[in-house]
Image (spheres, rainbow, N blue to C red):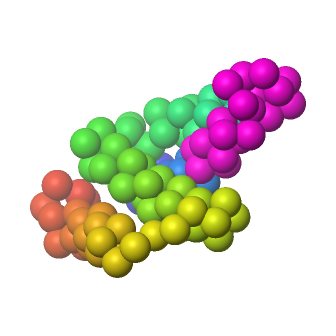
Amino acid sequence: MTLTLTYALLGLAIMLEVAGTSLLAASQQFTRPLPTAGMALWYGLAFYLLSITVKVLPVGIVYAVWSGMGIVLIAALGWAVFRQPLDSWALLGLGLIIAGVVILNTLSGAVRH
């Protein structure tokens, strides 16, 4: 599998995880069947795609990108959709997470380029 395809699958896995997490809130502690089923489906697909990416990239790098970008996207979604505020410290922290992901993928020798 090419590195480009691997990163595309990782990106899709991250998007599915973010969708699953959004539905987790909508499931209201698993009391609403449709959001709960959607959450389980998106999480399942996300983890399946994640399992494919670790065949090509180191698991620590994959997990760092997965968790870091998931945090940033969920925070952005919370701000845009659920009107959850982000103060300047939160924005700084999210910026540092993005910087860390970029450094891992562009400068680190732990990832094949």
Q: Position of residue 3 (x, y in %)?
A: 42, 59
Q: Which residues are magenta?
A: 16-36
Residue 85 falls within the magenta-colored stretch:
no
Q: Is residue 68 left or right of residue 16?
A: left
Q: Residue at x 40, y 73 (%)?
A: 87
Res 12 seen here: no
Please tell me in which quadrant of the rendered image residue 15 appears. bottom right
Q: Is residue 48 above or below residue 65?
A: above
Q: Is residue 102 above or below residue 75?
A: below
Res 48 seen here: yes
Q: Position of residue 13 (x, y in %)?
A: 56, 47
Most common secondary structure along the magenta stretch: helix
Q: Position of residue 64 (x, y in %)?
A: 30, 50
Foreground residue among 37 and 58 = 37
Task: Report the number of numbered marks.
Answer: 0
Q: Residue at x 15, y 64 (%)?
A: 108
Residue 32 falls within the magenta-colored stretch:
yes
Q: Is residue 41 above or below residue 97?
A: above
Q: Position of residue 43 (x, y in %)?
A: 62, 34
Which quarter of the figure is the C terminus placed in? bottom left
Foreground residue among 21 and 51 = 21
Q: Residue at x 75, y 28 (%)?
A: 36
Q: Is residue 28 left or right of residue 43?
A: right
Q: Is residue 101 above or below residue 46?
A: below
